Every structure is written in structure tokens, then in C-alpha cells.
Image (tube, rainbow, N blue to C red):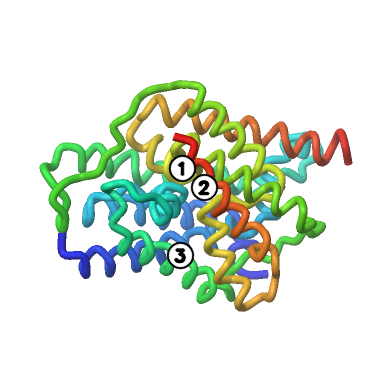
Amino acid sequence: MKSSVATLVATLMGALFGAGLVVSGMSNPANVLNFLDLAAIPTGTWDARLMFVMGGGVLVTAIGFPWLMRRARPMFADKFAWPTSSTIDQRLVIGAALFGIGSGLAGYCPGPAFANVGASMATGIRDMLFFVPAMLIGMWAATKFR
Amino acid sequence: MNFADTQPFIAAAAGGILIGLSAFLMMWLIGRITGVSGIAAGLMSNSSDSRRGWRIAFVAGLVFAGFAMQPFASATTIQSISPPMLLAAGLLVGFGSVLGSGCTSGHGVCGLGRRSIRSLVATVTFMGAAFMTIFLLRHVFI
């Protein structure tokens, strides 16, 4: 693959992804936490938005990915890098559980964290000064864990 | 208040579709899975598949959109989160998402679209853990 094409595509798609996060309200951690607070359902103050965001995203991939799986190769690369593992093991479950606890503590997952690095340049909110370095250290530590 | 808050469900579904389109086009055009934790972790590993250019580009685009789209951002606010809590949350999110091979984008948006049982198990696990965490934080420990 021409790396200049990959770089251009990835830049645009990163921006499209970030635009989706902002427009959907999911770059704002308050909306994520207010969705996670299921105890708010009976009181009528629950924020259901995250469900619609996931629904919209999965709608596109659930239609688009099976169509791509029947194709031989991507437009500008040699092969599709589809994930190959189907193993369900402790690593998967423990990792997902720790990730879930972390995202429940502050309302940030990796995509919104990066979008908020950009947002902070406009808003001055300093959360990402703490969250992102810690997240990168956590990621680095997990890559050493293999 | 703007579109994200005045038309919350339309904005949420529309934003979700943009995220799904990003994942679809990443795969169709350059054959890559749009998993943000995997993309970021790949910046820090030395594996054979660690060509970094597209990873840096994706993250740069994501950061840029976070800045440029700020006028459209949802204005909901909650009590601010303390720095120690942010550090703990960051460590758990980073470590957990890489140990479990994916986050909301990789396992959620992409994995569920591929009808992967492994990703379904991961998604149900992290959503469940997040629901329990916020329940304890808001309703048990206060």
C-alpha cells in the first residue's frame, strides 16, 4: 500500500470518527455517565443516547462489513486486516471488565479521550492532561503483559 | 445548547452513523479495523504489523475533529472528576482495553458488525462492568 494514501485516508477517517463522537454527544463524558446510570430509568432522567450511537454505528458495519468480507482486497491495500481470533478466554473477559470499570469511573474511553485532547484546546478543560498519559501507560503496560 | 442537545436522539443516531461510516471506509479503503485502543497501542509496540504512519494519522484526525467540531459539542455538565480518579480511570481503560484486545470501537462498533461472538462477550462484559461501577459510585458510596 502506498503509505501516503493510507495516511490521507486515516487522517480523514479519524476526523470523521471524531466528528461522529462530537455530534452524537459522546465526546462529552457527562452523557456517557448519564447513560451508564441505569438507576435513572425509573426516575425518567436516564440519557439513552449512547444506545442510539451504538445502534447507528453497528447498523453501518453490520451492512457494510459482510459486503466487504466477500471482496478480495481493499481499494488501496494488499489485504483486509480482519481480526482472526475467536478465542474467549480470561484475558478477554478480565481486560474487558477492567476497561468497563475504568470507563465507568470517568466516562471516557479511548476514542473520546483523543477527541477531548483536541476539544481541550478550545475549552481549557484539563481532564485529558491526567487521563491520556495514564491511558497510554496502561496500554504500554498491557503490551508488555503478553 | 445546540443540535446535540436539542435533537439528542437524531444527533446520536447521526453521529453513530458517521462513526460506522468511518469504520466501514477504513476497512474498504485501507483494510484496517477501526479500533481506537488497537490503533493507539500499535504506536507503542514493535510487532511486525506496527507500521505507524496511518495510526498517527488517524489519531491526529481524531484530535483535530475534537477541536474543530467543538462549536457543535453537547453542553451537558456534571460534577467534575478529580485528578486521582482520572488517573485511575485512564490506567484501567488503557490496560483493560489492550489486554482485552479492544474498546467500544473495536469490539463494539466493528466486532458486532462482523457478528463476532468474542466481541459480543467483550462488549457485554465491559458494558456490564461500567453499569456496576456507576451504580456503586452514584448510589452506594455517593
Q: Of the numbered discs in the image, which one, if any, rests on residue A139?
A: 2
Whether B51 is drawn above or below A142: the answer is below
Gap between marks 1 and 3, in whole Å?
A: 23 Å
Q: Secondary structure at mark 3?
A: helix
Q: Position of residue A28 (x, y in %)?
A: 64, 59
Q: Is residue B39 left or right of residue A73?
A: right
Question: Residue at coordinates 76% horizontally, 58% vertically from top-left?
Answer: B83
Estimate how packed mark 3 is, as few (under 14), some (14 to 19) or many (20 or more) residues with alpha carbons within 10 Å.
Answer: many
Question: Residue at coordinates 51% horizontally, 76% vertically from top-left?
Answer: B68
Whether A120 is drawn above or below B5: the answer is below
Q: Secondary structure at mark 1?
A: helix
Gap between marks 1 and 2, in whole Å?
A: 6 Å
Q: Of the numbered discs in the image, which one, if any, rests on residue B62?
A: 3
- Amino acid identity at mark 3: Leu
- Do marks 1 and 3 share a chain? no
Q: Which residue is mark 1?
A: A143
- Amino acid identity at mark 1: Thr
Q: Nearer the viewer, mark 2 or mark 3?
A: 2
Q: Is residue A2 left or right of residue A26?
A: left
Q: Position of residue B129 (x, y in %)?
A: 65, 32
Gap between marks 2 and 3, in whole Å?
A: 18 Å
